[in-house]
């Protein structure tokens, strides 16, 4: 059954960072999805810089207020960030990330159907270091954490929208904002298209 109310949980990419044209891919998706049926509602619950632990803490109370039929979870790459130098430990070690994602997905599934989204590839030459900070985002970490996320989601029998794999062979330069980490307006449109494609396949929606 096509979900009428959808809640997107995640960090800056869900929030819509760097899309100065349409407010991010979730808002672009909302405009499309709510045009299909006037009973459809899409909620953007993205918080910039959020890690998995914070997601776990807020998913139940936030969902209780919206009563979604589907939860979309986008952890992003804040957990794999390295602070200080490129070989510093990850903010959240990979084993702990797996455990946290297991808890997060289980909590979400206790509420309703759940789909997990991976992050997308970025330009490491601009993210290590990131802007004028001592934060480092490395592609090898992004790939490892995305693979771990997909494995946990499949073990939990959650849906998976693997943006990292779908965009791994795409030239991301034209899709990224100047910071090299977030998508620009064109990139958010690409994420929106991939999200719509997932919904068309999963729920048999018309291709308009």
Image (cartoon, rainbow, N blue to C red):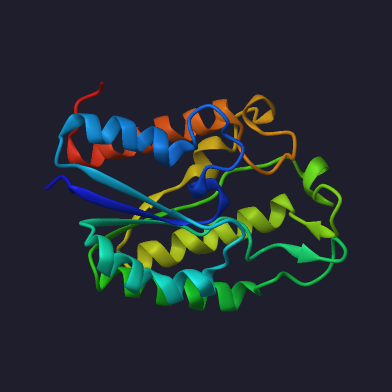
The location of residue 102, given as percent across then percent down, is 42, 74
The location of residue 155, given as percent across then percent down, is 36, 68
- Is residue 102 among what the camera can see? no
Q: Residue at x 63, y 61 (%)?
A: 78
The location of residue 148, given as percent across then percent down, is 53, 64
Q: In this rendering, would 43 be left or right of 148?
A: left
The image shows a total of numbered marks equal to 0
Q: In this rendering, would 20 be left or right of 99?
A: right
Quadrant of the rendering where the C terminus is positioned = top left
Is 150 in front, or is 35? Answer: 35
Q: Quadrant of residue 82?
A: bottom right
Q: Residue at x 74, y 53 (%)?
A: 138
Q: In this rendering, would 207 be left or right of 118?
A: left
Is 106 in front, or is 67? Answer: 67
Q: Residue at x 68, y 34 (%)?
A: 177
Is 171 in front, or is 41? Answer: 41
With respect to residue 142, does 100 lie above or below?
below
The location of residue 104, given as percent across then percent down, is 41, 72
Is 73 in front, or is 169? Answer: 73
Q: Residue at x 50, y 78 (%)?
A: 99
- Is residue 132 among what the camera can see? yes
Q: In this rendering, would 202 be left or right of 10?
A: left
Q: Quadrant of residue 144?
A: bottom right
Q: Quadrant of residue 105?
A: bottom left
With respect to residue 152, does 31 lie above or below?
above
């Amino acid at each position: 059954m096509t979900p009428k109310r959808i809640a997107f949980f995640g960090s800056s990419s869900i929030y819509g960072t760097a899309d100065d044209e349409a407010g991010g891919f979730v808002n672009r998706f909302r405009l499309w999805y709510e045009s299909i049926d006037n009973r459809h509602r899409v909620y953007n619950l993205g918080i910039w810089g959020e890690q998995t632990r914070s997601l776990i803490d807020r998913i139940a109370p936030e969902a209780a207020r919206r009563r979604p039929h589907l939860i979309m979870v986008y952890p992003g790459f804040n957990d794999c960030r390295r602070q200080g130098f490129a070989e510093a430990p990850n903010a959240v070690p990979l084993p702990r990330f797996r455990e946290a994602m297991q808890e997060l997905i289980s909590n979400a599934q206790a509420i309703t159907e759940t789909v997990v989204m991976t992050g997308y590839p970025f330009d490491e030459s601009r993210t290590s270091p990131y802007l004028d900070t001592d934060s480092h985002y490395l592609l090898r970490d992004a790939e490892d954490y995305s693979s771990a996320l997909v494995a946990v989601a499949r073990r939990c029998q959650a849906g998976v929208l693997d943006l990292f794999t779908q965009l791994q062979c795409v030239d991301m330069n034209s899709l990224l904002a100047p910071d090299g980490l977030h998508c620009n307006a064109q990139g958010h449109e690409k994420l929106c298209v991939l999200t719509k494609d997932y919904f068309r396949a999963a729920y048999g929606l018309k291709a308009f």
